[in-house]
Amino acid sequence: MHYQTESWGSYMATRSSYGDPLELIERMASEHAMVIFSISSCCMSHAIKRLFCGMGVNPTVNELDEDPRGGKDLERALMRLMGTSDAVPVVFIGGKLVGTMDRVLVSLINGTLVPLLKEAGGSLALIERATTPTNSFHQQKRNDHDHL
Amino acid sequence: MAFISATCPDSSFFLEYKDENGLLRKSCMAASHRVVGDTGLSDSGPSSSTHHVPYATVLHGINAPSTSFLHQEGSTFDFGELEEAITRQVRNDEAQAPLFTGRPAATLEMFPSWPMRYHQTPRVGSSKSAGGESTDSGSQMNTTTLASKGDQTQLEPESPMSKIASSSNHHHQQHQALDQNHLQFQQQNQQLQKDMPISDTSRATTVATGATEASKGQSAPKSNHEKRKGAGSTSENKQLDAKTLRRLAQNREAARKSRLRKKAYVQQLESSRIKLTQLEQDLQRARAQGLLMGGCGGGFGNISSAAAIFDMEYARWLEDDHRHMSELRTGLQAHLSDNDLRIVVDGYISHYDEIFQLKGVAAKSDVFHLITGMWASQAERCFLWMGGFRPSDLIKMLTQQLDPITEQQVMGICSLQHSSQQAEEALTQGLDQLHQSLIDTIAGGPVVDGMQQMAVALGKLSNLEGFVRQADNLRQQTLHQLRRILTVRQAARCFLVIGEYYGRLRALSSLWASRPRESMMSDDNSCQTTTDLQMVQPSQNHFPSF
């Protein structure tokens, strides 16, 4: 059973180097502003992708089950890294490990996620949508956020 | 007393003796009462009988001079014993009032040189204590003397009678002190009576029996008599002021300590009573849960033990919630310092952390119980989102209640609401994804592989726990962020509002559950409504703010 995915941005093309999965993970994280390791059939991964999409962020997604190099190794490496039985979803922002949905929500609510994104991302569009509140209460203040 | 001589005229004898003061006395004996050899005291012949004097007859002789005794050359007669017996008799007479008063006057006139002073109640009563004799007669004596107060005279410490009675001045002083103690104890009793009505019965009994125990200061209060004795103090009281004061202080101290002990005991009883009622409530709840489990066993499927446990824990959490709310309310009204209020507010946050933790544990065993919301009231269930409240709804509700609020705080709350909305959307979409996936799995394709299908479905169901966990995580983070944005006072008000809001939802559920049914209403609809509303029994949890 397979569900249709939207294109989430640049899909990881096959790389020549197969080395240590953990190294691969670290390399991927450092090369992109934001990386999400996911499994296409995982609902929580879907949720996390929808979250960033809703924020207007365009992350790099690595679907492990669609990785020709052998997602299982990566999966196992991620499990060891996170210390849980759930390998995905795992989020890296600006080369740094943010964590799984749990940590992402924590940092989202306590207000540290957006600055992290700002720091890592360069695209204005990326950040603007993420930070503009849609509450009517705040209508007049919308313009103030342009400088962010 | 020394026997001097006895002469024997023909038919009559008289006894000469020297009393204690050395005065020569004579006692005339009638011949007809010659009892030499007839008393049966001596076994020997007539000759020896003369040497032995029957004590009984001697004594009788003294009372009514009718005995005879002979005195030969030497004083073989042992009057030491006689002396002892006489003095003992006197003491006994002194002590045992009824006997004393009942005796013929002759007894009293044993020592006619000293005028007989009838010593009043206290001394004699106290002398009993000195001698350790019966108390009943003492009290009897007291009453008799109380009755005949007419001849109450001053105490006579120097009287020889008192000397004999108390055998020493020291005794007298002791009696005086004991009198004072009677008075003090009387006063103490009255004080105790004021403080603790419970002691009335004990006091009444002590007064009623008039028991005069010889213990220090514990003698029965002799009411007015004692008071007068103490109040109308004579010269002796001034001598004993220091001792009196000390004893007064000691008694006060003892009374105070006993009051404190009693207070502590009562408090202990109260707290035990409260514990007992709480235990009873817990037991009732447990029984109800047990009944529920049994009742639902047949029709609705068993409530899992995890669900039952969670329901019980939630009920307890609601009670704690009620208590926390009271603390917040009183804290705000009492205008506690920020530090003190912070402790209360942080306590409330921990209280919420607790329920999230409990839900996490329950989600591992029975996620459906949480998702269906059977643990919550109906109205809450109506607004249920992923096993709990929707954070953005809560913030929307709060924004109207939080005044005054700074610009920065407005921004913070706004941002919080926005973020929680985004998170809610994402999680909802993820759950929708799961639903769809499950439907596809269970519906299956044309070729159904039963066990495989079920296994896949089970695997997908296990993701539910993750979503409920993340939803609770979002709820928890929202509350924590509120705490960060607001001041201590604002946070206290905010949490009070939240608590009251859910309390009202629960109350609404109660009312809804007991609302009048359309089919049962009479012609007068409004009447029926009010009657039914009056029948509603609000439980403690449902009407916290009313």
Image (tube, coloured by chain):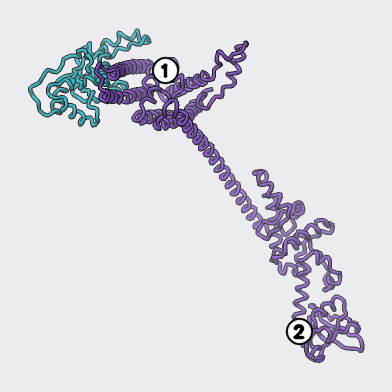
Marks 2 and 1 share the same chain: yes
- The amino acid pointed to by label 2 is Asp
Chain under numbered label 2? B
Above or below for B104 versus B416: below
Q: How far is the residue under mark 2 from the one under mark 1?
A: 115 Å
Is residue A115 among what the camera can see? no
Please state the horizontal and vertical placement of residue B95, each as a whole percent of the image.
Answer: 76, 66
What is the secondary structure assignment of the residue under circle 2?
Answer: loop
Q: Earlier in the sequence, mark 2 or mark 1?
A: 2
Image colour assigned to chain B: purple
Mark 2 or 1, which is nearer the eye?
Answer: 1
Q: Colour of chain A?
A: cyan
The x and y percentages for residue A121 are: 20, 16
What is the count of numbered marks? 2
Camera-nearest residue between A111 and B37: B37
- Pointer 2 with pointer 1, Cβ within 8 A: no
B381 and B345: which one is in front?
A: B381
- Mark 1 — residue? B383
Q: Neighbour class for label 1 at 10 Å: few (<14), some, many (≥20)?
A: some
Question: Residue B140's x, y, as percent?
Answer: 78, 59
Quarter of the view holding residue B306: top left
The residue pinned by badge 2 equals B78
Give the residue type at disc 1: Phe
Residue B503's spot in the image, x, y percent?
Answer: 48, 22
